[in-house]
Image (cartoon, helix red, strand yellow):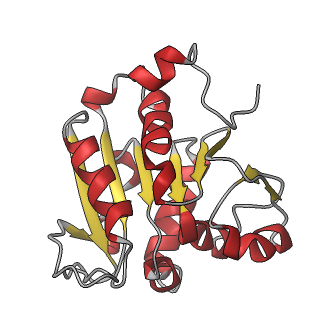
Amino acid sequence: MEAKNASVAILTADFFEESEVLFPYYRLLGQTRKVVVATPDGRPPKGKGGLGQFTVQASFADLAVSDFDAVLVPGGFAPDIVRRNSEGLDFLTQMDRAGKPVAMICHGAWVALTAGLLRGRTVTSAPFIRPEVEAAGANWRDEPVVIDGNMITSRLPQDLDVWIDALLGALGTSTPAMAASGGRVEGRDS
């Protein structure tokens, strides 16, 4: 598959980290077929930094695994709301079971943790939740991006470029950063 034919779902909620939603949204919008922002109830969420409401296209209940090639979970405080929603957890779990790219940044790992998807995986996240991630059975690394099978994790907003490069790579697009590194993304298991 090529990224230009891919559909990506972004799972978020109120108090999302603006940079971790807006940057991926616009970058993916320019390089994929479709990007759908979904919230628990389909209502526009408010950013944690004061950004007004952000347009959404769906509720978690509207999402079908067959319609998407990847899922992205940004951070901020939104993951704490997302992980309380059974439909969002179910969608993320089904995407993982289907082997489709599951990309999470910062506190986004909370959602996979709650869904029980981290045991035995090598991941990264915001350093602040490292103890919870490790307690869930994951091997935590302090690297900009860690790829373990279909799971693509990243730490903080300063890692956004390499994180989205890794997701696009998983969707079949070689980005300039990946080409310069010979296709290797920092933190990727060999």
Please indicate whether residue 27 sits to the left or right of residue 156 in the image: left
Quadrant (top left/top right/bottom left/bottom right) for the N terminus: top left
Residue 33 percent across, percent down from the top left:
20, 36
Residue 27's place in the image compared with 94, above or below, is above
Residue 155 percent across, percent down from the top left:
59, 58
Residue 12 percent across, percent down from the top left:
37, 72
Of 15 and 86, nearer the camera is 15
Please indicate whether residue 2 sits to the left or right of residue 99 in the image: left
Of 143 and 16, nearer the camera is 143
Quadrant (top left/top right/bottom left/bottom right) for the C terminus: top right
* Residue 36 placement: quadrant: bottom left
Residue 157 visible: yes
Q: Residue drawn at (69%, 61%), measured in percent from left and top? A: 117
How many marks the image carries: the answer is 0
Of 38 and 174, nearer the camera is 174
Residue 86 percent across, percent down from the top left:
50, 80
Residue 173 visible: no
Residue 38's place in the image compared with 171, above or below, is below
Q: Residue drawn at (69%, 33%), measured in percent from left and top? A: 188
* Residue 4 placement: quadrant: top left
Residue furthest to the front: 158
Please indicate whether residue 146 sits to the left or right of residue 134 in the image: left
Q: Residue drawn at (75%, 32%), measured in percent from left and top? A: 189
Q: Residue drawn at (64%, 34%), measured in percent from left and top? A: 186
